Image (spheres, helix red, strand yellow):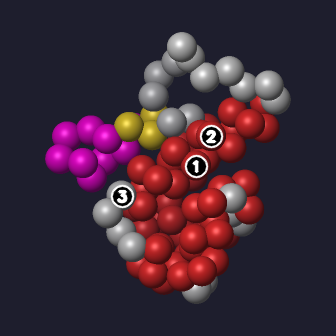
Amino acid sequence: MPKVYLRPVDKFKAVIAYNFDMVAGRKTMAEIGKIIGRSTQTACNRRDSPLDLTLREVFLICQHEHIDPAEFVGGELRLRGAGTIFIKEEA
């Protein structure tokens, strides 16, 4: 059965959480913390509460992974090829 979202913000949160997990991949939260210029604990907090990601943090993650920030917040990312290129899922 498909996931039902009661509010638009719930769907947006799910997309950001999914994309954060996709980008994090096999990286540790310490590595993610270094990428966003924050502590390991802050990286864990961002994973647990993805709506708390700042625009700067989104930009730094996207810059590190060579992803367009609009794709990060605009839809679910999918792996393509060797697992290093992200593409936005077509609706």
Identify whether 85 is placed above or below 91: below
Residue marked by disc 2: 14
User: What residue lies at 66% left-to-right and 56% top-to-bottom?
Assistant: 50
- The answer to whether one can see residue 37 in this image is no
Q: Are marks 3 and 1 in contact (CB under 8 Å)?
A: no
Residue at image coords 74%, 62%: 52
**Disc 1 residue type (three-letter):** Ala
Labels 2 and 3: the sequence-earlier one: 2
Q: Earlier in the sequence, mark 3 or mark 1?
A: 1
Q: Is residue 80 magenta?
A: yes
User: Element at badge 3?
Assistant: loop
Where residue 15 sits: x, y (%)? 59, 40
Q: Which residue sits furthest left?
A: 82
Circle 1 sits in a helix, a strand or a loop, which is it? Answer: helix
Query: Outermost residue, top direction?
Result: 1
- Specify whether 13 is left or right of 30: right
Residue 54 colored in magenta in the image: no
* Cα separation between marks 3 and 1: 12 Å
Residue bearing the label numbered 1: 17
- 42 shown above or below 74: below
Magenta-tinted stretch = 79-87
